[in-house]
Image (cartoon, rainbow, N blue to C red):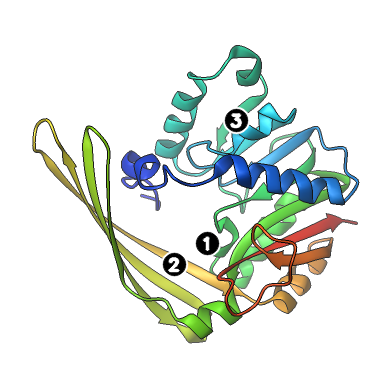
Amino acid sequence: MTVFSDYAACYDLVYRDKDYDGEAAHVCSLLSAQSLNAGTVLELGCGTGGHAVPLATRGFDVTGLDRSEEMLTLARQRLGHVEPALQRRIHFAQADIQDFKLERRFDAAMALFHVISYLADDGALASALACIRSHLDGQGVLVFDFWHAPAVLAQRPETRERTFEDANTRVMRRMRPRLIADRRCVSIDIEIESMDKLSGAVRSIRETHLMRYFDGDELRDALHAAGFDVHALSAWMSHAPPTEEDWSACVVARAR
């Protein structure tokens, strides 16, 4: 079992307010700032496909990878609700971002919603970056967000509980984090109680997500070793440098 296997069933309800369109627009602005006329985009950790449709709407051909088949099933269902012209621009495949081979290259790659922070050790990070680099054209651009170490250490993760519901389902999610400072990681125990409002049936889900936090220098070193140069480092959804207030930061790197 992988993370986001059981979680997939209620994922879109939990994140229904996420601004996928705004995030896709921001990525497009970052690519444009690199003077990149990107036509093809590789999305790592695409989840249920929330970014793929707004990217395709903006003219990109999108290939989304995720290692959770459950998430990809939902992504393909999402495609069933868009017009055929957009459907033809989007493809999904099951793969681990540390080890995939698509027999093609892309103008750009992206990994959003802290996908890179799931690479909890140096070896995993190096493997993923090398694999991504091998799938990019000449000076292709990689954009990803990540947990920003100064903010994580200043704010410290804390237990959070929220309830989400729609007409059919009520979901209670509790997240219990534990800082593992010597590994620069946070282990998050996620507990979910999902209730079907019609039948009253309740389903319990338990998953543990290990998240790594990074500072700019270690990412620059890892990216350089994989054949990239960092061109921008900012707070996520901003063009300003990240601070201790910005839990999520963003890197724009270019292949060399």
Q: Is residue 103 above or below residue 68?
A: above
Image point (48%, 85%), residue name: 181
Q: Residues within 10 Å of mark 2 (few under 14, many from 20)?
A: some
Query: x%, y% of residue 254?
Result: 84, 56
In what element is the residue under mark 1? helix
Query: x%, y% of residue 217?
Result: 74, 78
The image quadrant of residue 114 is bottom right
Query: As drawn, is 219 to the left or to the right of 18?
Result: right
Image point (32%, 39%), residue name: 9
Residue corresponding to mark 3: 53
Query: x%, y% of residue 190?
Result: 31, 61
Q: Residues within 10 Å of mark 3 (few under 14, many from 20)?
A: many
Pair 3/1: label in front? 3
Q: Quadrant of the C terminus?
A: bottom right
Q: Is residue 3 above or below residue 167?
A: below
Residues at marks 3 and 1 touching, judged by CB atoms closer than 8 Å: no
Query: As drawn, is 222 to the left or to the right of 161?
Result: right
What's the residue type where badge 2 is placed?
A: Leu
Extreme-left residue of the structure: 200
Residues at marks 1 and 2 touching, judged by CB atoms closer than 8 Å: yes
Query: As drawn, is 153 to the left or to the right of 40?
Result: left
The image quadrant of residue 215 is bottom right
Image point (48%, 18%), residue name: 80
Which dot marks residue 96? none
Query: x%, y% of residue 111?
Result: 63, 51
Query: As drawn, is 9 to the left or to the right of 221?
Result: left
Residue corresponding to mark 1: 118
What's the residue type where badge 1 is placed?
A: Tyr
Between the C-alphas of marks 3 and 1, the distance is 24 Å
Q: Nearer the viewer, residue 51 or 131?
A: 51
* Sequence-first tag of 1 and 2: 1
Which dot marks residue 210? 2
